[in-house]
Image (tube, rainbow, N blue to C red):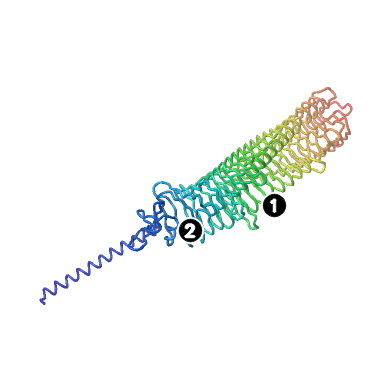
Amino acid sequence: MKLSQYKEKKKSKKVVITSAIIVLLIGIIVVGKSFANFKVNKSFKVMEGNFIYEANYYVSSKGSDTTGNGTKTNPYLTIQKAYDKIKDEGTIKLLSNIVVNQVQNLTTSNKKVIITSEGSTYEIQRGSSLTTNGVIEVNNQNELSLENVIVNGQKVNSTKPMINVYNSKLNLNEGTIIENAINNSSDTATRNGGGVYTDGSDVIINGATIKESTAYNGAGIYVNANGSLTIKNGLIENNLATYEGGGIFSKSSTKIEGGTITNNTTSETTGGNGGGIYVNNSKTTSITFEMTGGIITKNKSKAAGAGLDLFGLLTGTLSGGEISYNESTGNNAGGIQMSGDNQDTSPNIILKDNIVIANNKAKNNGCGVNVNHGTATIEDGATVENNAAGLTGGGVRAANYGIINMNGGTIKGNTSGTDGAGVKVAGHSVININGGTIENNIASGNGGGIDGGENSTINISDGLITKNTAENGGGGMSIGTNANATITKGTISENTAKTAGGGIYFLANSGSVLTIDGDVLISNNTGDSGGIEGRTGTIYFKNGTIENNTATGNGGGVCLQVGCTFYMSGGIIRKNTSSNAGGGVMVISPSKFEMTGGTISENTAQTYGGGINSFDATVRLTGGYVQNNICKGSSGCGGGIYSSGSYYRSGTTVSGNSPSNYAGNAY
């Protein structure tokens, strides 16, 4: 071989090797880019036979599980076949409506699967013969996401929920509709959940709609224990539970961030709680409930908690959203019901910031918020308004050892058919008011602002109770049998009672106590008696101001009758007006009034006793001042004091009153 030929051959070999290297590098780059795309888009390729195609498996009613390969042009017939072909994660795309006559078992462990529609929104339909099982079952740590797809039960009577998820995760995303499921099972193991049932699983609803389904509990969705429910956005509507949880029944921690829960119903009259949502925890380990947004509205319950019912050991916060226009047609709590078997296993819930509970109705009690065991804490920003109770507690009610802590917020514009339009405290329950406003509530009985019922406790250390109305007594507040109240700071003003006690009506029994001691203002209230009326029990007035109140009858500042004892050791009763007797204080037998300190001044009565009037009662004055009061009756009406009963004075200064005659017991 010539040298030139050898060189030419060597050169040709170099070219071939170089070309091969270039081709190899290009191949590596292409493969690398494909791998990168897989990482980002989760779109990868699978080899099957002589075909290489993306793991988007297509399903059509015209497809075949035998001759199909899952491509768009040659789809499978069933979701089951497409799911079985997915290795770890992938997407199943519907090309048409699919009728399911056998449950689709998505149970191979640790798969992430999306079911969606290609083009139009298609349906997964329950077949008429599929009556003893669900349409889709997910198990074994899988994750199923539904997007832009309809799961339609077609109103087929069945004995199991439509979608069943165990120990897995379910994402219900935008464009998904779950509808027309009927679960009429009588078996306790299968009767819960119409559209969706989950157990030990996490559920996220983000844009889906669950509607027009029926079940015993949780007609829209039933979330069993050891999981979670999060609603970011979406719609739960027009579902019917024949027992509890019309829209949602949850035994797991639940969070509502957005969406709407509306027009859901429970039909059972003896225990059908939670028209919109029922969260129930009977375990000894607490779960949580949180609401930061969303709307729970126009739900109905024939029992309690038409909007939201919380039962058992729960902690949580409602800081946003709205619970409104819900109605309990047979019992309590149009808005929220909180209850438990006892105080130790009951909800502890905080309402604050932007939560609104408004325009709900209850046939009986506690329309806005009803605490039947448990604790509700109302803080700044929370609003409970325009709710209507047929009986007691239009805004808020506590019963059976319930506790209400009011540190801020507003309770306003609520009504009650009997007592406690703003707040009703009954049955060994307690309200602690440390701030906030109770205003413009109207009671058809007693207690426009607050009614303390039997064995209740009212503690007020701050806050404003104003512009409330009672058709009977206690425009601002009424205090009933065996009830006790302590007021150390706050204002009770501009309230109205059609009969007794424009500000406070103390109709408790002989063992009850009202203590007023601190920076307390009771002013500008109007009623048959103005500031305070005491019927029985004992009132201690140690410090504070009772002023500018108006009585259309007797006792502009204070009226005592039936058998109430009033001890005044400090404070001021001034500038009150009575249309009859007792501008400052009216005492009617067998009541008693004892004054050891304080001031009664500048009060006015039309007939007798500008400062104090006693009608056959016991009055004992050993300190303080009665001065500058006016009686506009006859010359002997007693500008300062008029007594027709047992009267003793030693150490009390009486001066500057008009008229000032000292005939008999008129001073």
List the single residue furthest toward the front. Answer: 129
| Amino acid tagged 2 | Leu
Q: In the rendered structure, which amino acid carries the disc numbered 1?
A: Asp
Find residue 276 and report its horizontal and vertical position in percent: 58, 45
Q: To which quarter of the image does residue 660 belong?
A: top right
Residue 458 place in picture, x, y as percent: 72, 44
Q: Quadrant of the N terminus?
A: bottom left
The residue that label 2 is drawn on is: 106
Look at the numbered discs 2 and 1 and tell me whether their residues touch, using CB distance below 8 Å: no
Can residue 229 be seen at all in this image of the molecule?
Answer: no
The residue pinned by badge 1 equals 341
Q: x%, y% of residue 392?
A: 70, 39
Between 324 and 169, the residue placed more toward the observer is 169
Relative to 341, is 602 above or below? above
Residue 508 shows in this picture: yes
Which labelled disc corresponds to residue 138? Answer: none
Q: Residue furthest bottom?
A: 1
In the rendered structure, which disc, 2 or 1, sits on the residue that comes first in sequence? Answer: 2
Depth check, front residue: 386 or 572? 386
Disc 1 is placed on an element classified as loop
Q: Is residue 342 left or right of residue 539?
A: left
Q: Secondary structure at mark 2?
A: strand
Query: In which image quadrant can residue 451 be found?
Result: top right
Q: Quadrant of the C terminus?
A: top right
Q: How many residues crowd mark 1 within 10 Å: few (<14), some (14–19), many (20+)?
A: some
Foreground residue among 270 and 295? 270
